[in-house]
Image (cartoon, grey):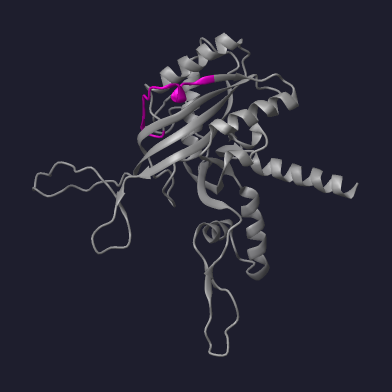
Amino acid sequence: MNDISGLILLPRLRVQNANAISGPLSWGFPSPTAFTGFVHALERKLTDQLSEGFAGVGIVCHHFEPQVSQPAGCRHRVFCLSRNPAGRDGGAPATVEEGRAHLEISLLIAVRDYFADNEGQYLAEDLQHAAYGMRLAGGSPLYRPGKRHEASWHPLAGNLDADIDVFRKLRRRLLPGFALVQRDDLLQAHLADMRQTDPASTALDALLDLSRLNFEPASEPNSTGKVTWEIRKKPGWLVPLPVGYAGISPLYAPGEVANSRDDGTPFRFVESLYSLGEWVSPHRLDTLEQLLWTHEADPDAGLYRCRNRHAEFMADHFTESQASTQE
């Protein structure tokens, strides 16, 4: 937390009709890129008040309501789509499926700039006012009166113990809810286990195996040949998570590709990157770094993604615990 001077909490934001299809393989809660992009857009709106900018955003979901329905006689669900006008022939035109969901979330934004208490609170209020006039994951944040929904400023002292105490107090305001963190360590460990029996297994195979319900025999067949089947237990509430994009073409000079959105920015064709996410209760997080998501770009490698340090903290914590046990 050395480069973070304070935290801004945007509590209990109600977002209407957010995008529920943020990747080609999955649907559900929006991708972390939607929230890091939202915070970056807020930062650009407040450039006159910020010099260092923001250092990341924590994402906590309190309520998720997908706009789906279940057709009569069917076991699957479908998205509630808007009805388009009839075509020239009187028939319904082809539509692109758009999944939507209503959200209630809290965002914890890390600020690098130093502000006094009053100045920090003014910044938080300006930030919330700007947020109500923007789009978040394609949805519309709705104004909600009441002290419970007011933005707040929480300065950090720069002392490790004092900053941890500030974060622990903030965790209470994030309950009840679930924080989204990245668990690529579990994905790599599961891939290594799968390759012991099938060396041809890929990271996609491991991701699908962790994301689905796997029915397995709980015991050996008894004398009657009957077998008890159970759902394989997971190490947590794991979900497939689109975290950014990987380049599939060279980086073209500005204006070299026709019909690109911005003629002043280099252009590259990309595909979605997937990782493994986990929903955890905020009271199980020990430090701010476990919660924050940040942008990370490596144009030479063709990677443009979001990162969360939860897995790194868990590895460091395990190493320290193991060292103290040996001593």
Magenta stretch: residue 208 in it? no
The answer to whether residue 66 is above or below residue 219 is above
Which residues lie in the magenta part?
A: 137-152
Q: Between 147 and 31, which is closer to the camera in this rendering? A: 147
Q: Between 270 and 111, which is closer to the camera in this rendering? A: 111
Q: Position of residue 211 (x, y in %)?
A: 51, 57
The answer to whether residue 193 is above or below residue 222 is above
Number of labelled discs?
0
Q: Position of residue 191 (x, y in %)?
A: 63, 59
- Point 55% across, 28% down: residue: 108
| Any part of residue 267 in sight | no
Magenta stretch: residue 140 in it? yes
Residue positioned most to the right? 327
Q: Position of residue 103 (x, y in %)?
A: 40, 37
- Point 42% across, 49% down: residue: 24
Q: Position of residue 299 (x, y in %)?
A: 58, 35
- Point 44% across, 51% down: residue: 26
Q: Between 138 and 169, which is closer to the camera in this rendering? A: 169
Q: Between 69 and 51, which is closer to the camera in this rendering? A: 69
On-image quarter of the N terminus: top right
Position of 10 with respect to 289 (left or right) is left
Q: Quadrant of residue 180?
A: top right
Q: Quadrant of residue 279?
A: top right
- Point 55% across, 56% down: residue: 207
Position of 80 with respect to 217 (left or right) is left
| Any part of residue 192 in sight | yes
